[in-house]
Amino acid sequence: MEMNTLSILNLLAGLILAPLLPGIINRTKAVFAGRHGQPVLQTYFDIFKLLRKGAVYSRTTSWVFRLSPVIGLAAVIAAMTLLPALSAPAPVSFAGDLILFAYCFGLLRFFLVAAALDTGSAFEGMGASREVQFSALAEPALLLGLAALARATGSLSLTGIFSASAGPSAGPALALVSAALFIVFLAENARIPVDDPNTHLELTMIHEVMVLDYSGPDFAIILYTSSLKMWALGALLVNVLFSFLPLHGPAAVACVAGSMILLSVLVGIVESIMARLSLLKVPQLLAGAVAISVLALTLVLRFTS
Amino acid sequence: MSLLLLPLIIFFAGALLQMVFGRRVAVVRVAGPAITVAGALAGLIPVIRAFGGKSVTASLPWSMPFGSFSVEMDGLSALFALPILVICALAAVYGSEYLKSFEGKKNLAGFWFFFNVLAGSMLLVVTARNAILFLLAWEVMSLSSFFLVIFESEQEHARRAGWTYLVATHIGTAFLLVLFCMLGAQAGTLDFSGFSAAGMAPKFLSAAFLLAVIGFGTKAGFMPMHVWLPEAHPAAPSHVSAVMSGVMIKTGIYGLLRVLTHLGTPPAWWGWVLVAIGAASGILGIVFALSQHDIKRLLAYSSVENVGIITAGIGIGMLGMSYGNDAMMLLGFAGALLHVLNHSIFKSLLFLGAGSVLHAAATREIDRLGGLMKRTPFTGAAFLAGSVAICGLPPLNGFLGEFMIYLGSFKALTGSAAACPAAGVVVIAALALIGGLAAVCFTKAFGMIFLGEPRSDAAAHAHECGPAMRIPMLVLAALCVAVGLAGPFIPKLLIPAVQVLAGRQMTDGNFFAPTERLLTNISLFATGVLALSALLLVLRTRLLRNKPVSESVTWDCGYAAPTARMQYTASSYADPVVRLFKLFLQTRRKFVSPKGLFPEKSSFSSATPDFYRERMYRPAFNATEKFLTRFQWLQHGRLNLYILCIMVTLIVILVWKLR
């Protein structure tokens, strides 16, 4: 029973704290740039403001455009129910749930892209085209990374993977998996060096341009979904990084939540000190992530039994 | 009379009777589909019996040398017969309306004759238990589908497609002929029940395996034997494409599996061969698919991809079998078989949807369509369901089969009995990449055809199809959802077939219990996702109540006169990925750039012809033709000399035999 409340606590922490992450990233960037910056809670303010508003729809759009945000949010919440916090189990877990975790984001992406194409805008088509291209390459990196974790711990569920100890021989492999997952995290969440959320030119956007035509509650859902996605993939990374810590109970949940804040600061630093890659270079970065995952997998196959 | 003979009789006798007595248009319109539906209903009875664990057998006296008319419906046959019957019946209902525009112009009596013969011969292929009977049924199946492909034979592309198909299928059959002669010579009988791996040399078994892979792989569409598929499937009427792509190519998978059951425990490299073919067909199939401009060609290439997924699953199952890893074997085989069922559902749905688009807007060019969701909402919704399913996304059915193959590959990596981890890695990587690329392909297909603004007048004035075309699509779309949620019931369909493949009765309940729990979990999760979506939809609707909701134009940066031609096109959408794979695709681009201060003309076009067809088959066939023209002096057109040649040959053979 105690474990159950912990799982729920972990899920709730994600659902409640996720919109904090963009705020922290922006604040970090502001500090680096010597600006005061927007409030850390800005995403919450935006979401609540948008929820109270009406909506404007393009005449070109159909019901697909109106349905998509809802399905995307449901998919990402579903994915979050599979995420443990170190030794604290996830609310839902079974053998193979790591595949389901990856595919939930596929569902989110399918509908986000369909909605973008529904507007008939060339900008949004362009963004959609880039999004599907990059995520097609990020997917093998993610799944091969998860396969390395499964091999290292002998478990096929996320809860099992992070509650089992992989042993010191898996250390280098875990470090490599973390690196691959960090690249996937940046790419999937439309951060520098793959996408620049602050760009002001529609032509150069990826994620932002796909949601240009959303307004009101739908846009609030989109903002919230993006935050949750960042939390879910970030928490996965944090789990890998700290899986060696012998933390139990509420401490594990607190560790993950706290590390998420650190991760946001890290993303902020990356965004402050790096320029965005040219679009043609991004596939190389993602192929690099795949290569790192394969290397990690080779290491665990060779050095663990 | 056996239950199994009844559907065969309905299909074949029905086809003949209708050809002889019912050639009037009004009769054909009803009688043709009615025979298919009746045959399918009759066929479902032995299928259900077989799923219950009781094989249905029948045999008839037959005076064919070495032949015996013995048929059997066991678990494996039933699993393939089920989609054959269901999809043929639904396609027939669809066809009754689809073919209306051809009435009076085309010989529809002939069409329905071949359609019903095709349905009957496919059923016979999966139930035949004698090599002669099997090959006969196989040939009837190939020929009847050939005549369906050249239905619009006044068009050159249909004739060419039919020719390619005819050549390809017979090359495949040639390998099968050798295969069965070999097996028969060893066993001393051509009855399947007599084939046995016991006492056969490993080299012999491996040769048989390779023959089966090439022979059956040609029908199934393994790369690089797939070249007929993207030609023949688009040329046929859409409901025939649905049958061919949805179920007929699966008879190749069935044949391979059936032969494997007679070849004993496979050595590991057989599994590797199938894993490699599966990964290559899967990845290249989807890459070719997303570079196509013709919706039916795109769907045909995507069939190559899905056959690749199925083959990779079979490969994992065989590796599990040869390493004695039961969990891997079970998940690989069961996942592959489930994907056979699932693919038949969503691929048929997509082809029927494509037919409806063709019917509505008179074009298959994706770049000339757009905005059909508003004009043909029903087809649009059905196509969306099929697209999500074929991308293998939860909560629909496509995810289940891929999930099991994934898990089988993970089992190759983990656990105490880890076997052949490298194959697991290959399949995981391939499935992940295929999943990502399938999303590109089908967001393109769905998005560019149904969303946005119409890109041509024909698309702007499209009209929705009638009820006879809608009902089959509705049934298939409902099946996509239902199978996704029916996890707990699926193992009951798969277990009899897996037992046939494993070559042993697995009465141990513990063996299947994990699979059942697994699929139950997925279906519960899928239900959760659907319920959550519904809840959020209600919430969103409540939030928008009493709020100002208005309509406007799409954000266009304030441009004054946007037109539909400014939309992103299907080709530009897929272009980044096409460029990534340019090594394989070799897309040809033709670009006339605008010139001068007041440019008048410019144009751009691209085409992706099949790499293997261009680089492998065309040179090979050209060389063969060149060689054979040397013997043209024999072909002088004098009949008396031909007869003389035949006589001389016969006498030589006779003398040689009597010597």
Image (cartoon, coloured by chain):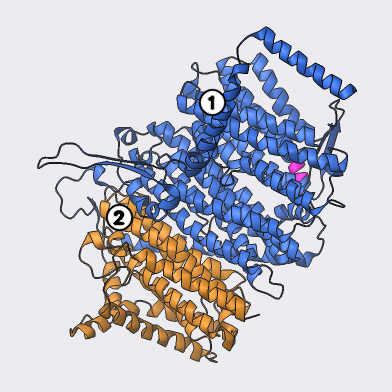
CB contact under 8 Å: marks 1 and 2 = no
Q: Residues within 10 Å of mark 2 (few under 14, many from 20)?
A: many
Note whether A84 is above or below B546 in the view shown.
Answer: below
At x 51% / y 49%, what residue is drawn? B285
Above/below status of A144 relative to A57: below
Q: Position of residue B484 (x, y in %)?
A: 58, 56
Relative image position of residue B247 (x, y in whole percent): 62, 41
Quick one: which chain is blue?
B
Residue that appears at 65% across and 73% down = B414
Visible residue check, residue B451: no
Q: Which residue is mark 1?
A: B150
Residue occupied by mark 2: A126
Q: Is residue B89 above or below residue A59?
A: above
Q: CA distance from mark 1 to mark 2?
A: 39 Å
The colour of chain A is: orange
| Quadrant in the picture for residue B422 | bottom right
Quick one: A206 or B653, which is closer to the camera? B653
Query: Which amino acid, by three-letter code, is at mark 1?
Result: Ile
Q: Position of residue B231 (x, y in %)?
A: 50, 35
The local secondary structure at tag 2 comes to helix
Q: Look at the image and tell me whether residue A279 can be seen.
A: yes
- Neighbours of disc 1 within 10 Å: few (<14), some (14-19), many (20+): many
At label 2, the amino acid type is Met
